[in-house]
Amino acid sequence: MNIENKNGVSFLTFDSFKTAGVKHGFSTRIGGVSEGVFDSLNLGFNRGDLDENVRENYRRIASALDMNYERMCLSKQTHTTNVIIVDEKDAGNGLTKPLPYDDVDGLITNVKDMPLVTFYADCVPLFFYDPVKEVVALSHSGWRGTVGKIGKVTVEKMHEAFDCNPSDILCGIAPSICKDCYEVSVDVAEEFIKAFGDSHKAELLRPSIFNPNDKDKYMLDLWAACRLVFLEAGIPEEHIEITNYCTRCNPKLFYSHRIMGANRGSLAAFISL
């Protein structure tokens, strides 16, 4: 991914999505007005930051990405695999009008000029764009969402609602925690073995580097797992772009729950037709 800066606001983009001409971006901490632990481009209303600061941050990132602030449609994430279709009536959800839904970790639309927005601080942001059917989507894939294969759920819903062919869809895995930073317990590791099979165990899990003598700790590769989910959904290998930025490794650039805990801001993914 590439870091771009416009009017002092820094964000990341995928080469393949830029080549396809779809507006998109993943935010950093840089370019906002929030202060203290929220410094500076916090995009989460539920973090304890001042609402007026968060709204100004949205205006700034909207301008940087050339997206419509008034029509942004936000998610309400709870680590589920719930993915919904949003349409014209949903323009402004969560930003200029109240959210009408709960428990939504993925959004899909074919509506022009209605940016989709999902939130992060180590979990994996998944981007989707079908240039043939003109459909975009975002999904939030933490470890629970990855075990539940929310990436595949999103592709299947794109097909059901808009007849999208997986072979046409571009997919992106955006900044999130990397395999050298994500230590998990044995129960989480076992869930991944159940979901992906023993054949992929070595690809996804390694002995802990933080607690090398603890056999109940593993290092988990969420990026590799999400890639496997995309391939299982029928996405061509060459249509998958994977980030080179870890949120935990770069706390000056990103908010990281593993470093900062709950006392922090939120990053966001954006995509718009």
Image: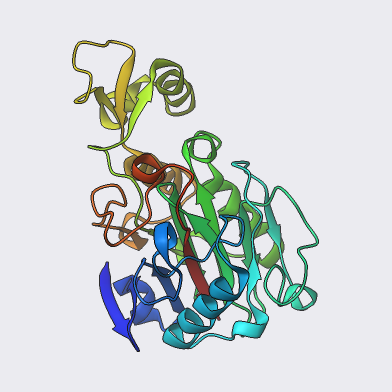
Quadrant of the rendering where the C terminus is positioned: bottom right
Q: Count every numbered label the image shows and give the total.
A: 0
**Colour setup of the view:** rainbow
Residue under the image location 37 percent in, 40 percent down: 258
Residue 87 location in percent, x, y? 74, 73
Residue under the image location 47 percent in, 48 percent down: 263
Q: Who is closer to the viewer here, 240 or 263?
A: 263
Quadrant of the rendering where the N terminus is positioned: bottom left
Q: Is residue 272 visible?
A: no
* Image vertical order of residue 53 relative to residue 192, above or below: below
Horizontal placement of 64 versus 79: left or right? Answer: left
Residue 211 location in percent, x, y? 23, 19
Q: Who is closer to the viewer here, 139 or 266?
A: 266
Residue under the image location 65 percent in, 75 percent down: 110
* Image vertical order of residue 106 relative to residue 6, above or below: above
Residue 64 location in percent, x, y? 42, 85
* Image vertical order of residue 1 relative to residue 210, above or below: below
Residue under the image location 72 percent in, 67 percent down: 86
Residue 252: which quarter of the image? bottom left
Q: Is residue 196 visible?
A: yes
Residue 8 location in percent, x, y? 32, 84
Q: Who is closer to the viewer here, 266 or 147?
A: 266
Residue 107: which quarter of the image? bottom right
